[in-house]
Image (spheres, rainbow, N blue to C red):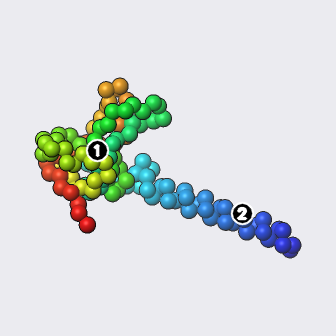
Amino acid sequence: MNKKFIWIIAVIIILAGMGIYFALNRQLSSPEQGLLPTPTSGPIVVSGRITCLSKKGSGIQSMECAIGLKGIDGRNYGLKKPFKLDPEYKFSVDGLRVQVSGTFSPEEIKGPDGNKYDVVGVIDVTSIKEIVD
């Protein structure tokens, strides 16, 4: 075999390997792919980071911010009544690492424009605490 043919085969193998790697990595990190079981209604404890929730789909995103939780499981959760426990809004800082306890329900959240937020459900918050390293 000539060197050009070997190089072509090597490039094809490398590209195929990269494609498989990225496809598997996306599946393992995307709960939407169904690899993680959907939480059921009831008590739940989730660790993650406070985030401004995005809307589902590729439509126009408005400037309003619904405070939510990006769990370490990769899922987004809406937070119901977090300010009842946090009147000073110290747990509203984007990126803040927290642990949230409460009651989970697989309901949807809609913004004022009627579009749905990208969440697996809502946690009715009973406690929230900062995770400090």
Query: What is the number of the mark on residue 68?
Result: 1
Spatial distance from mark 2 to mark 1, Cα to Cα?
43 Å
Please provide percent x and percent y for residue 58. Answer: 48, 35
Quarter of the image for the C terminus: give it: bottom left
Q: Outermost residue, right direction?
A: 2
Please provide percent x and percent y for residue 22. Answer: 55, 58
Residue at image coords 45%, 35%? 57
Residue at image coords 79%, 71%? 6
Q: Is residue 86 left or right of residue 116?
A: left
The amino acid on which the numbered mark 1 sits, given as a three-letter code, is: Gly
The residue singled out by tag 2 in the image is 12
Q: Is residue 25 left or right of residue 77?
A: right
Camera-side residue of 107 and 125:
125
Q: Is residue 91 left or right of residue 37?
A: left
Please provide percent x and percent y for residue 88. Answer: 15, 44
Total numbered labels placed on residues in the image: 2
